[in-house]
Amino acid sequence: MFDKFIKLVIGDLDEKREYKQMMKRVEELPEDYRFAFKKIQKYMYTVGAPNGDISIFKDLNMFNELIGLFQTSAFDKKPVTEVVGNDVSKFCDEFMEAFSDNSETIKEKINKEIKEKLK
């Protein structure tokens, strides 16, 4: 009972620890990668998944993969612009799409449901 109350008021402490560990990895990145990660993370949370599939935000796997990509690229001394390209929003959308459980867009899903219903 007390555990449920703590989770309700404070949130899941394990998730908070995991997030803090993830952000510690971000702080260890070179400055340009760190800046890019924070901007990309803000974009992803603000804009959301391109097809409306919010399940990609249920855990930190997507962000941990992005950090891994940035760590590898920084180790190889690649500029962050070479990794994300000139269109960062496109990079973000494609990266989120890769983690989406449902590759079908909301529009496609609605069209499919209507077609099935009307047959």
Image: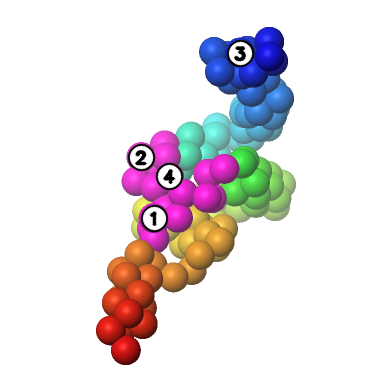
Circles 2 and 4, Cβ within 8 Å, touching? The answer is yes
User: Whole-Å distance between the Cαs marked 4 and 3?
Assistant: 30 Å
Mark 1 closeness class: few <14, some 14–19, many ≥20 residues within 10 Å? some
Magenta-highlighted residues: 42-58
User: Whole-Å distance between the Cαs marked 3 and 2?
Assistant: 29 Å
In this picture, is 23 found above or below 80? above
Residue 28 visible in the shown view: no
Q: What mark, if any, has residue 80 been given in the picture?
A: none
Instruction: Name which residue lies at 53% across and 59% down.
Output: 100
Label whose residue precedes the other's in the sequence (3 or 2): 3
Number of numbered discs on residues: 4
Q: Nearer the viewer, mark 4 or mark 3?
A: 3
The residue to which callout 1 is attached is: 52
Q: Secondary structure at mark 2?
A: helix
The residue to which callout 2 is attached is: 46
In this picture, is 2 found above or below 65? above
From the viewer's side, name the closer residue of 7 and 17. 7
Label whose residue precedes the other's in the sequence (1 or 2): 2
